[in-house]
Image (spheres, rainbow, N blue to C red):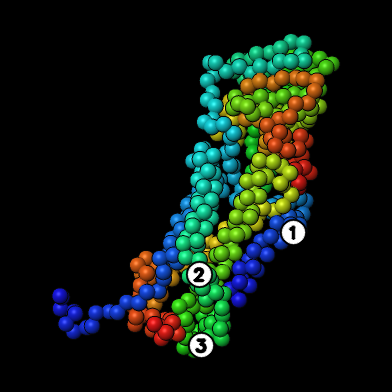
Amino acid sequence: MGRGVFLGVVGTGVAGLFVGGRISHAAAPIGSVIPNALRSLAPDGWRIYSINPPWPTFNPAHYRLVVSGAVERPLSLTWDELMALPQARQTTDFHCVTGWSVGNVGWQGVRLQTLWDMAKPTAEARFANFISLEQPYVDTLTLRQTTMPQVMLAHSMDGKPLSQAHGAPMRLVIPEMYGYKNVKWLTHIELVGKLKAGFWEQHGYDVDAWVGRSNGY
Amino acid sequence: MDARTATEPAPEYVRRFSAAEQSLHWLLALSFFVMLATGLILYLPSLAEVAAQRALWKSIHLGAAIGFWVGLLLVWSSAPGELRAATREIDHFDGDDRAWLAWAVRRNRSEPPQGRFNAGQKMNTALVAGLMVVFTITGVLIYLQEVNARFRGTSAILIHDVAMYIAIPLVIGHLYLALLNPSTRHSLRGMTLGTVRRDWARRRHPKWEREL
């Protein structure tokens, strides 16, 4: 009987690996943004992931946001110049590919279109590489994705300057895609004609990381 | 010689757990609590910024898991026959054990006589052993799916979380019985020193005590 209990636990666990997603799918609230809302039981709230600790440090005197590559006019913006650009605000949800979410995050920042109006992408420009101060982190969007309505470069979160943990001074925000596309500690945007795999894409994660419709969800 | 020994006979002690059994228990206890602590640091949002060095906590978590399995192999190979016998003992539930499980819930009669392990201890051992295997399988999958997304598509994180939510109450119950509950806490001595008082064994584990 002891063996039966042991094998029962192991068997239930292994079966759960394959049906757990479906059960949590059925249990998810109707109309939820993520189909598998209970994919993980993790309590809601931020986890701070980094690939090359310690986190990069922000120095406003030395910080530059560089826009280069397939543009007519490359940019190298100082912190003051960035803050002087037209500001946008939004409240959106944040979803991690590992299953946790944070709802109603207030972001403030700059729309990508504002930068493109200044830098003027050439006809060759099709993808934007977002390069982090945390090397070698990089991720990409198509140029069209960068101007979707809720995409921005955020420097403020929930009414406060972005903290070091959340990617100070600037991070990309694209709520429709999983967190790994939302590059933190952003310092350089390079426009290119050919897609280059981002950090997690090199580990097999989807290039188009749509929430609820990619990475096995 | 103190005054007590003159009036009361010195308690007689009998060996309940072998060195290998004790080692296995403490190996599991140590690695479980290391994995629980580091796991919670990685899991709880309130600790997310404390866990700035996530990689460090992750290595300790994985190291403890590897340490557990390597230690298990080492201890097992030190006394394979003895531990196989203990496993058979835990596997075997007789009529008294089944009656004991009913008694544990209803308490409507006197305690059915138990062997070296009571039915609850057997049940706990089997459940915990199963959970350790489930933790390991899902943990390996979680590790692999971070290295490469083609290992995604199973509910490894969900099952790892569920296993934790089952293991924690089991461990809390185990700690209560071993440290606080008056009629069972003497068994802690068995797990630390290997021996228990004979009169306690006669009360709680009479079928085993009779054979000694």
- Kindly tell me whether residue B94 is visible in this rendering: yes
Q: Secondary structure at mark 2?
A: helix
Q: Which residue is mark 3?
A: B108
Q: Earlier in the sequence, mark 3 or mark 2?
A: 2
Residue A170 in which image quadrant: top right
> SS at mark 1?
helix
Q: Where is B29 relative to A79, above or below?
A: below
The disc placed on residue A19 is 1
Q: Is residue A34 left or right of residue A83?
A: right
Give the alpha-carbon distance from disc 3 to disc 2, as whole Å.
Answer: 39 Å
Q: Position of residue B124 (x, y in %)?
A: 53, 70
Query: Quick one: A76 or A91, which is closer to the camera?
Result: A76
**Amino acid at the residue labelled 2:** Gly
Q: Is residue B158 above or below residue A146?
A: below
Residue situated in front as seen by the camera: A80 or A49? A49
Rendered image quadrant of residue A145: top right
Q: Position of residue A183 (x, y in %)?
A: 66, 30
- Dot 2 alpha-carbon crowd within 10 angstroms: few under 14, some 14 to 19, many 20 or more: few
Q: Are marks 2 and 1 in contact (CB under 8 Å)?
A: no
Residue to which mark 2 is pinned:
B81
Q: Are marks 1 and 3 in contact (CB under 8 Å)?
A: no
